Image: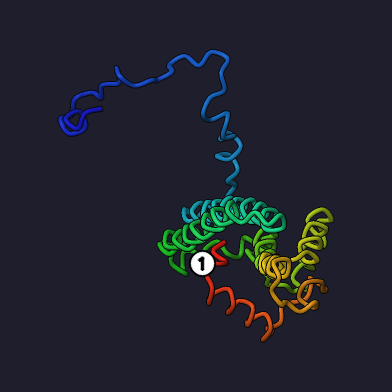
Amino acid sequence: MSSSDQTSGRPVDLSNEQVHWDLGESQSYGEYLGLDKILSAQHPISFEHDEMLFIIIHQASELWMKLCLHELEAALDHIRRDDLGPSFKMLTRVSRIQAQLVQSWNVLSTMTPAEYSAFRNQLGRASGFQSYQYRMLEFILGNKNARMIEVHRRDPQIYATLERALASPSIYDESLRLLSRRGFEIPEAYVDRDWSQPYQPSKQVAAAWLAVYHSIDDHWD
C-alpha cells in the first residue's frame, strides 16, 4: 500500500496483498480467536451506558492476567531446571503486561465516580477482590496469605487451585533454591520450608545476592 493511497482518498490498492477472499474450509480469524464467545460475553445488568466500559476493562484485565500466569508458570519451570535464558524473556514479558494493565486503568478513569455509582449497587457483592487469577499472581510473586482464598471456597476447583499455589514456592523462593544449587550459602530454612507462609528477610540471603552483584560477570545468568 503506497502512502499516496492513504492520503489521496483513492481506494486502497490491494493487488500486491495476499488477501484470502475465499476461506473455503479453512479456519477464519474470528474462529481461531473464539470471537463469537469473547464478544458475546458482556452482559450488563443495568441500563447505564458506562457499565460496558467497566465490564470490558475487567475482562481484558483477566485475559492479561491469564497470560501473566502462563508466562510465570513457564518461567518457574525453567528456573527449576536451571535454564534461565528463557525465563528472562518470560519475566520481561510479564513486566510489559503489568505496564499494560496499569495503563488500561487510564481508560477506566474516563468514568466518573458518579457514573460508577449509578450501577454499582446492581453488582451486589461482586468485586474485583474475588478475582482468583489476581490471587494466583499474588501467590506466585510471593505475597502469601492463606486467608485470602476463603472467598473462593464456594468453587471447589478454584479453591483447590489456589491451595496448591499457596503451598508452592514463589518465583523468588525458586530463585533462592537456584542460588543454593549453585553453591551460594542460602540457609536451609529458605530452601525447604512451609511455602504457604510469607517470606521473611534474611541477612544471609542478602549476603548471597550481594555476592552475585559483586561478580556479575561470573553470575551473569
Task: Establish if 185 lies above or below 50.
Answer: below
| Percent of width and height locating residue 213 | 54, 75
14 sits left or right of 199 in the view: left
Residue 125 in sight: no
Q: Residue at x 23, y 23 (%)?
A: 11
* Horizontal and vertical percent position of residue 56: 53, 51
Instruction: Give the position of the N terminus as an image quadrant.
Output: top left
Amino acid type shown at disc 1 = Asp
Q: Nearer the viewer, residue 9 or 164?
A: 164
The residue drawn where x is 68% and y is 69% is 179
Q: In which quadrant of the rendered image does the C terminus lie? A: bottom right
Q: Nearer the viewer, residue 85 or 168?
A: 85
Q: Position of residue 95 (x, y in %)?
A: 51, 60
- Residue drawn at the location 51% of the way across and 51% of the way down: 52
Out of 194 and 41, give the one closest to the viewer.
194
Residue 216 x, y percent position in the rendering? 52, 70
Name the residue that disc number 1 marks. Answer: 217
